[in-house]
Image (cartoon, rainbow, N blue to C red):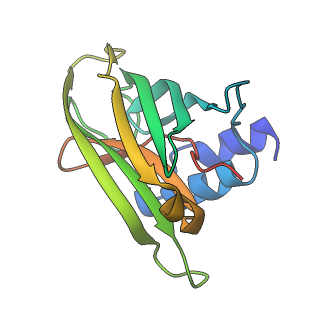
Amino acid sequence: MSVSVCRRLMRPRWPARALVALGIVAFSQGCGGNPASPTGDVTTPIDGSYGTLAFRGSVVRRNTGSRYEYAVQLAATFDAAARTNAVSAIHLTAIRFVATRTTTPGASASVLYSDSRSISADFSADRDARQLPSVTFQLDKSIEQQAQHVLVSVTDGRLLWPVPAELKTP
């Protein structure tokens, strides 16, 4: 899938649920990338946006035996003019990590694993930029094998901003 198609798909025009689903499909079809290092670590670059937050950074997946460790490093920038998740200020309270699976086409995804880490990051003016705290999540390989998607998002406890990157590697 071309980068221009990916950008069109990730533009916030549709309801949040539809955009999240579309973003998952776009990234699983080849938008983004997961270059492996000589040590076997897989780094997923983050450079995209969802509504009022733009994200940059990376997620590194490390093999730790029976589990994978996902080290998340993100910076976020507030876009007060965005229409999706339109707010005048944001107080992020958590970074969420989920592994999901859809068993029937068109059905809602089942959550196989979910975890979160508390954070605190405030955005009150247009173009405010913050480095979010680095966090690490663990996921059993057996769950990762069953999952169709492994994703990260941030929340203020009311709204959710999905980070536009698929962390599951083929």
Q: Horizontally, is 16 left or right of 59 in the view?
A: left
Q: Is residue 18 visible?
A: no
Q: Viewed as shown, does residue 162 lie left or right of 169?
A: left
Count up the numbered dots: 0
Q: Position of residue 152 (x, y in %)?
A: 42, 44
In the shown orientation, is residue 151 left or right of residue 37?
left
The x, y position of residue 57, in whole percent, is 50, 22
Q: Residue visible at 33% across and 30% down?
A: 135
Residue 94 lies in quadrant:
top left
Asked whether residue 160 appears in the rendered view, the answer is yes
Q: Observer-nearest residue: 42 or 38?
A: 38
Q: Residue furthest bottom?
A: 104
Dividing the picture into quarters, in which one does residue 105 lie? bottom right
- Residue 14 place in picture, x, y as percent: 50, 57
Q: Residue at x 50, y 40 (%)?
A: 64
Seen at 51% across and 81% down, the residue is 107
- Residue 43 left/right relative to 163: right
Residue drawn at 37 percent across, 62 percent down: 113
In depth, the one of 96 and 13 nearer the eye is: 96
**x then y, percent, for residue 59:** 51, 31
| Depth order, front residue of 29/111 | 111
Image height check: is 139 above or below 133?
below
State which quadrant residue 154 falls in.
top left
Q: Work out whether 154 lies above or below 148.
A: above
